[in-house]
Image: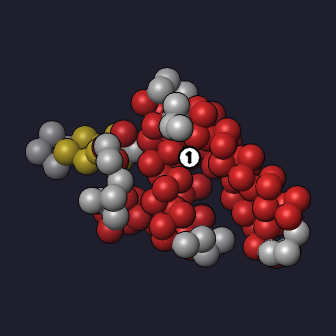
Amino acid sequence: MYLYEGVHLLSVAATEIQNSEVLWREDRTAVTLKSRDGILEQLGRMAVQDKLDRTDCVYLANLAIAAVRAGYTTREVEVALRKIRMAAKSSMKNPDDEALYCALGNTVDILRRMGGVA
C-alpha cells in the first residue's frame, strides 16, 4: 500500500519532482516497469502513516533521486529515508525539544550529502 502511495506522490507532484523516472518508470508499450520499491515505500509511509507535509515529502523525494543518481543503492537511500522518518516522528511528538529537531536536521543533511545537494 505504501509503495503505491509513494507512486501517487510522484504523479501528483510531477512538476515539482525532477527525474521521477529514477524511482518509477512505466512503459505500457513495452509492458515494462522499473521501480525502486524500498524508496517509494518510505516516501509513501511519510505521506500517509507519518502525515508529513506534502512539501517535505516532495523535498525528500528529490533528495532521494539525487542520491540514487549519485550512485547510492536503493537500499542505502531507503535506510536514510527510514532514519529521517524516525527522527521526524520523534520531533513531531516533542515539538519543543531542540535536540530532537537538530537530530532530524542531521538525518536530512546525510541524505542531502549523499545526493551532493548543497
Q: Is residue 86 visible?
A: no
Vertical order, 20 against 95 (above or below): above
Residue 68 lies, in percent from the top left, at 48, 33
Q: How is the image coloured?
A: secondary structure
36 sits left or right of 18 in the view: right
Where is residue 14? Give x, y as percent.
Answer: 29, 59
Vertical side of 61 occupied by 97: above or below: below
On the image, the x and y values in percent for residue 71 come to 49, 24
Residue 4 placement, left or right of 80:
left
Which residue is depicted at the point 79% across and 61% down? 101
In front here: 116 or 53? 116
The disc labelled 1 sits on which kind of residue? Gly
Q: Position of residue 54 (x, y in %)?
A: 48, 70
Q: Label 1: how many residues lie within 10 Å, few (<14), some (14-19) or many (20+)?
A: many
Is residue 20 toward the left or the right of residue 37 in the image? left
The residue drawn where x is 52% and y is 31% is 116
For the point 35% across and 54% down, which residue is it? 17
Which residue is label 1 attached to?
38
Secondary structure found at label 1? helix
Report which quarter residue 104 is drawn in: bottom right
Left-right relation of 68 to 34: right
Using the rendered view, name the quadrant where residue 102 is placed: bottom right
